[in-house]
Each structure stands twice: as C-alpha cells, then as structure tokens.
Amino acid sequence: MARTVLWAAVSGALGLPPTLAHAQVASAETEARHAFDIASGSLDQALRQFGQQAGATVSVSADVTAGLRSPAVHGSYTNAEALRLLLSRSRMRAVRDAHGEYTLEASPAPVERTAAPGGAPSAALIDDPEVGMLPEVVVVGTAEQASKQAPGASIITRDDIERRPPVNDLAEIIRTQPGVNLTGNSTSGQWGNNRQIDIRGMGPENTLILIDGKPVASRNSVRYGWSGERNTRGDTNWVPAQEVERIEIIRGPAAARYGSGAMGGVVNIVTKPPTDQWHGSVGIYADRPQHSVDGSTQRATFDLSGPLSDRFFFRLYGNANKTGADAYNINQGHTTPRSGTQAGTYPAGREGVRNRDVSGRLTWKLTPDQTIDFDASYSRQGNIYAGDTQNTNNFSTSNTGALATTSQRVLNYLGAETNIMYRENYAATYNGKFDFGTVKAYLQYAKTRNERLEEGLSGGVAGLFASDTYQTAVLQDYTAHLETNLPLKTAGVEHVLTLGTEWTLSTFTDPGAVTQSTSTGGSIAGVTQSGRSDRMSSHTKALFAEDNIAITDNTILTPGLRFDDNSAAGPNWSPSLNLSHALSRNWTVKAGIARAYKTPNLYQLNPNYLLYSSGNGCWGVSSACYLMGNASLKAESSVNKEVGVEYSRDGLLAGITFFRNDYHNKIDAGLAPVGNASGGNGAYIYQWTNVSRALVQGWEGTFRLPISASLDWSNNLTYMITSKNKETGERLSIIPKYTLNSTLDWRATSLLSMQATLTWYGNQAPKKYDYQGNPVVGYAGQQRASYALVGLSGSYQVKKNLRLGFGVHNIFDRRLYREGNASGTSNGANVISGAGAATYNEPGRSFWASLTASF
C-alpha cells in the first residue's frame, strides 16, 4: 500500500470545529485518517480506546453500552469510519456536535459488516463503498496532544464521574488517579481539613488548575501564611460534576508547557460543549452520613443546550449545592494533650460549603472550520463555619476560666458564613482550521472577591477573628493567549510545529494583609506602622515553541522551549524534551525531561505584608520576630524527569513509570534573620527567601484487565521514594508512602452497572521540625497509620431518559479524627501538643443516591 503521512487536528483535544457538516462522512481525501489499534471486546472499552487514539471525545453512559461488544479495528481510518466499524454490532450511531465531539444515539438498524478472520474488520474485506481500500497512514498530532499521551497523563471521562460522583468537590475523584493525593497547603497541618490536589508530592501550590484550558487562580486571593498555609478549598469546585465532559491530569515534564505553577502537574476540567441538537437535563443528588456528626450533602443541577440557528449554538447550566459542616465538637476527646487555658480547645472538623453556579456559552460557527466561543460564568462559594482556627485554639479561656473574647466569636459564628468567595469569569475563544494549520486564541478576564471576617496576623491570634468586620480582597486576572499549529515536512520528516505567545496580568488588593502594627516588635526601615498600601500586581509575557516530530513510524520526539518574563521575578527559560517509542505493536517506552517553574506569589513579594510572632514561630530563635515580603525573590524551578514502559494487548494494559523532580530556589520563610527592628522589643526580621533545594522521586504503576465481556478490573499505584527539602531535611508534603486505587466495573445488564472501589493509603510520616526548627518529639512525631476505604456504587437506567445512581461510601466505616496541628505551641503552662500527621478528618459511612432526567 502507498504510505501517506497526514496531520490531524484533534477536535476533542483542542476544541476545533469539525471539517464535516453534521454527521456526514467525508472522503478519504478531505478528512485526516488515524492509525487505530483497537482490540475486540466490550464496546465501552473500545470507545475509550478510540478516544485516546483519535484524541476525540465520545460521550456515552455505560448504561447505554452495557453488554455490547465491538469488533477489532486495526488500520487507517477517519474518525467517522472507525466509529462506524466499532458500532457495527450495535443499534447506535455517532453524532457529532458543533465542536466535533461525538455522542451516541439509536440507529434504525444495525449495520452488517464482513469481518476478517478473528473478528477484526479488514480494509480489503469491508463492503462499505464509503470506506473502501484505505492506505496505511501515520498521523502526527500537535505537541499538546502528545502531552496527553505522556506516561504522566490520565483522563477521567464523563462516564467515570457518572458512576462515581463526588460528594462535593471534583478533587474527590481526581485524587484516584496515579500520582495524585489530597493534602493541606503546607506541612503545618493548619486548616488541615482544607485539603487540595497534590501531584507527585510537590504540594498544592505547584498544581495548576485549568477550566477548558484556561487558568483558574481564585485560591491566590486567600492569605498565604508563615508556613505556606492557606485557608482555602482550592479551585476544583467551580464546576458541578454533572457538567464535566472530562478531566485531564498531566503530571511531570509534559506539564511544563503550561508555564508558571505547573511544576507538579496540571488538572484541566473540560466542561460539556454546546450541541447541535436540543438536549437538557435536571439532576438531584443527596449523600446522607450514618453518623450525625458528619456533614450531609444535597444538590440540584440543570443544563440546556442546542442550536439557535445553523451558525449559533448555546449551553447553559446552573447548580445549587449544600454540604453541611461537621459537628463543631466532632474531634473532642480525640486530641493530643492540652493544658492550662488551652485545656478546653480542640481542632475543628470539616467546614461545610454552599455553592451557587451559573454558566453560559454561545458558540458562533463563522465557517465550517472557524468558531468563536463566548463564555460567562458566575459562582458563589460560602463556607459553613465549623469552628476552625489557625492554631486550633478555638475555645481557649482567660486566666479566670471564662471564654476569651476571640473564643466567644468562634462560638457565635458556628454554622455561619465567615468567608465567601465570588468568582466571575468572561472569555472569548477563537478556533480556526486553515490550509496552513490551525489557530487558537483566547482572551479571559477573571475576578475573585474574597470576603471574610477580619483575622489576626500575629502569634496565637493568627487566624482568629479579630473583629466582627468583614474585609474583602479582590483578585483580577487577565490572560491573552495565541498559538498556531503548523504541519510541516522537513528533510522527509513529518512534524507539527507549535508557536505561541501569552500575556498575563494579576492585580490584587487585600486590606486584611497590611493590618499588622509595628508598635510592639519595633519599626522596620521603609515600612510604615500603619496605612500601608495593600495593592499588589504582577505581569508576565511569554513565548513558546514546540515541535512534534515523527522521527520514524514508531518514534515521536517532542522538543519544546518556553520563555517567560515576569515583572517581579525576571526572565525564565523552560526547555523540554519528550519521547515516545513503540518497541513493538504491544510495547511502548516513553520518557521526558523538562524545566518547570513558578513565580513567587503576591504575598511573598509584598514588603508591606507583615506577620509577627512573639517567639514560637521564629526559626532558630526563641524571641520575637517579623516575617516580611521580599520584592527581590527569584522564581522557583524544577527539573522534572520521567521514564516509563507500557504494555497493551486485547484490552490488557500494564505500565510503570519512574519520576524524579529536582527542585531549586524553593521559597521558604527564611532560616536566618536579616536584621532587627528598631525600638519596641527589637524583633528579629525574617524575609521570604530563595534558600532551598529539594528532591521528589517515586514510582507510578497502572494495571487494567478485562476479566470478561462485562467485567473490568482497573488499578493504579503510587509509591513515594523521597520527598524532602535538601537544605533542612524537611518533607515537602504530608502524603501517604503509597496509594493504591482499585476499581471493579461490572455491567450486569444493559440497564444496570455496578462498581466496587478500594483505596488503600500507606502510612503518613509527619513533618520533622517544629516552627523554631527543632526536631519534633512526642505526639508531634506520630505517623498516621495506613488505612483503606471501600465503596460500592451502581447506576440503573430506569427509562430511556431517566437514570438512577446509588451507592455507599466507606462501607466499613473507617473513621479518622483530626488530633491537632502537626506541631504544638506553648506559653508556660498553656500547652497545645502537636499531632504529627493526624491533621485531618476522614468521614464515616454514608449513603448516596442521584436521579437524572434528560431529553
């Protein structure tokens, strides 16, 4: 056969418009063909493989494909041809929406095909004149598409979310992927139940969150504490679960292409696109705990999508969710020892949250090959206060035994909203396909208002409500992005060159960050005692280039280079090199190396941001000190490396990956004072400083086995070898030594599917040093022992347009309690002992149900 090398713009990955009108099949000359290698087996599994190999999205419930089989598809086909073959044994057909994403619907009758020996369709034997004889094809995609095939990449589909919906936050299902855990923003355990996505032990601050490929940074509006803590729920709860098309997780070197903040990895939450036919749904969900002290959840979501004309399409969704707070005294009786005025204190459980979300998208189809998306969304997240304070000193008393003034405020606000986040987002996105390649451009404006009760900034009152006054921090992020993908042929080698540029601007005001007085500790040169400016800003200009090169039919090499120039941290170069080589039809080796980076956050850069400690929080000394921002900080960087091998055959998939991140210029709160204040008590002055080198390394493994036509077993394992600061020996994150996720999927009938899940967390070692740099002892050195959580869920298609979901979380009722912060504090006889790694709650058994009606 003639060998042809074609370039395919993958609509599912890039959101490009389809080259076909509606569901018509194009000729082999006008639509790119892909090299497919899909084994015969369950239709559900085959469609997943199709999506991975084509870079396209097929939306279908497991209930629809339950019990259905598909033939093998080996060879070079267009997406439409491959889907027609996969569906040849079913009464379904694939329909493409305005963005080229596929949904399945009933077909009048099954299409009969002639199969090659063994059940595999053969181009030479297919009797469909629209398919015919097809040449052998090698497809070269873009560098972005290649990044999603890296060993550190995984995808959570809409079907995965429907079968295992999160109780409240998408982080609950994201954490089930290789290399991903939930942890606090720092190792201190402060605000310990506010856990966020941590990828490969690099910490939440090094995980970049995207929605539809665009950055989300609302958590940056929350104050950054002495040890790196933030009292935030993170940025994975802005999109309701029912409105997610898929979630892409990219770990390691492949994430470097996304710029600042992706040293650990990237999570891209892709929402459902508009459709070219009218569709809508209404869903309700409820989760009820067995123990009344655990918070319950209820939510309702709706969506509507369809064509306004042959050129305009829209999508609208809304969501209302309430997750109740744990009982304020859930951890009473489970704390480490406390004495004196702290004897009646105890750490709080998980705070609750109220979500209100509305989002709309209008797609304008300029031509069959060009679209503009206009997006607008608004969200409100308000907490339901459970009594947490930064130092877990919520109900401390005065020397007379009466509640302190700050403690009375804690009691007064239980169950109230003490912090509310408002997020507005507006974006315009252009996608175009031309003879020379593709163009993607977008403009985005995001505004976050962080309204919360005024908090103290010094010592024991840090994080406690300082008054009944609400203060509002305002973060505004502007992004302009442009890139083009150019299919080229150089010296007989096919490759796709990506060229792009990006500009970002962040402006921020936080009146609560500049309230720390210098009257007690003494004055600092250049810093006024009060009335300091709370305005902060930073902008970055970037250029990037990548080239996805088909060295041979079996080898893809992807070099890349990104240059960023930040107004505060200066220039940064981020080179990368990724390789994928097929050793045989079943074996593939993948490797990568990249330099990733992160600019200092706005709090770290602001000299007007002061924190004060009377002694407990000062590294290396026991007397008072300040910590102040440093406008001269450099960007943090990390050289990320990974190498993996993967075996795939007839639905069996097994792979193992080794990763290593060498972390440089890590920003810490300073290990030595840079001076002393004048007057007052002459407090030492510390600054945020680039002082640390760190190392993170470990293993990731995956294993998926189709046990039968209706039963699949999937597993992934993460094992951490090292996670430490090379300067101090301190751990970077408090995460399990190993994490095993195991899932058994059973498609019992065409209407009923069941899923059993097991997550086994290894032991968690605590931080090694207290706030002053002394080795931890006693309770502060305790580990959290390994534990396992087992779940069971099911989905039943009651009617064509009515689906019931049900399940049990934590079947064996394995409960964990928060015993305190990692390190303790003391003031004479008034002692709060540290709790080591026991800094969060794990809720007990709960029962959930959902009902979704659609048309």
Image (spheres, grey):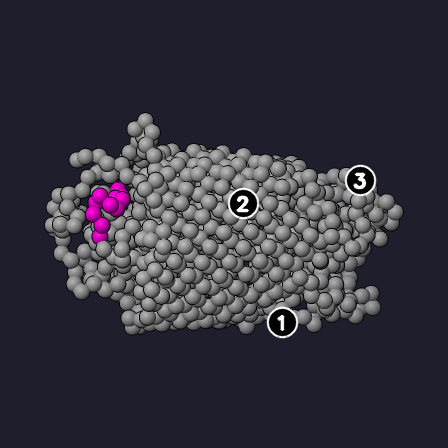
Give residue 809's position: percent from left, percent from top. Answer: 45, 64
Return the residue at label 1.
415
3 or 1: tag closer to the N-terminus = 1
Chain part drawn in magenta? 25-38
How many marks overall? 3
Q: Is residue 36 magenta?
A: yes
Give residue 49's position: percent from left, percent from top. Answer: 30, 49
Give residue 677's position: percent from left, percent from top. Answer: 83, 44
Q: Is residue 35 magenta?
A: yes
Which residue is pictured at 70% across the width and 68% down the height?
A: 410
Label 1 packing within 10 angstroms: few (<14), some (14-19), many (20+): some
Residue that extends furthest to the front in the rendered view of this protein: 366
- Where, by quadrant of the figure, is residue 328 drawn? bottom right
Give above or below for 545 relative to 652: above
Amino acid at dot 2: Trp
Per the image, label 3 sits on a secondary structure element best described as: strand
Give above or below for 312 relative to 636: below
Of tags 3 and 1, the one toward the viewer is 3
Disc on res. 503: 2
What's the distance in space between the residues labelled 1 and 2, CA to CA?
A: 42 Å
Amino acid at dot 3: Gly
Which residue is pictured at 43% across the width and 66% down the height?
A: 316
Return the residue at label 3.
675
